[in-house]
Amino acid sequence: MKAIYPGTFDPLTNGHMDVIRRGVRLFGSLVVAVAENPKKSPFFSAAERADMVRESVRGIAGVEVKVFGSLLVDFMRAEKAAIVLRGLRETSDFPFEFQSAVTNRLLAPEIETVFVMTSAENFYVTSSIVKEIAFLGGDVSGMVPAPVRKRLAGKS
């Protein structure tokens, strides 16, 4: 069964990696879908973000990385996937994630959203925090995979 793990991943964090590993274990096949969202202005381009994800998941069987710029439900239909995988860090994530899941279900009743809780060691990590620490010269090695750390260092 194929699942889609959509996100901006600007940049990918160890929390995202935790969700990816668990998603593959749960579903066997996982597409990490890097979103091109014209409403957001990410620090890294979609191609850079997809490359960071590809480099970070190298060696994890069952994971593909794709960029999409459409409605998630349209991308899922094109991929023939019916499961959206989402990670929840803590309670502030829930309202947005719940609203997204309900909206996707209204647009495509055949699609289910599955939430997994982020592991305790990663619940505090966000892409925004990672960028701020990195650009102020702090050590993010415990928060992001090595390929992401290298890209952040190159942008600082």
Image (tube, rainbow, N blue to C red):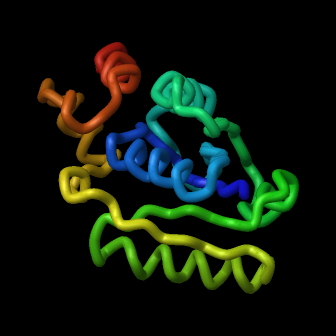
The image shows residue 91, relative to residue 33, as above or below, that is below
Residue 89's x, y, as percent? Answer: 31, 64
Is 109 left or right of 26, judged from the image as shown? right
Is 88 left or right of 35, judged from the image as shown? left
Which residue is rendered at x = 41% and y = 47% of the image?
16
Residue 150's x, y, as percent? Answer: 34, 16
Q: Quadrant of residue 154?
A: top left
Residue 76's x, y, as percent? Answer: 78, 59
Which residue is rendered at x = 66% and y = 46% of the image?
31
Q: Quadrant of the C terminus?
A: top left
Is 147 left or right of 34, judged from the image as shown? left
Between 121 and 40, which is closer to the camera in this rendering?
121
Count of marks, rendered view: 0
Residue 153's x, y, as percent? Answer: 29, 17
Q: Quadrant of the N terminus?
A: bottom right
Q: Quadrant of residue 88?
A: bottom left
Which residue is rendered at x = 58% and y = 75% of the image?
100
The image shows residue 52, relative to residue 10, as above or below, that is above
Between 8 and 117, which is closer to the camera in this rendering?
117
Work out whether residue 95 can be spotted.
yes
The image shows residue 24, relative to residue 138, as above or below, that is below
Is 155 left or right of 50, judged from the image as shown? left
Between 92 and 1, which is closer to the camera in this rendering?
1
Which residue is rendered at x = 66% and y = 47% of the image?
29
Work out whether residue 36 can be spotted.
no
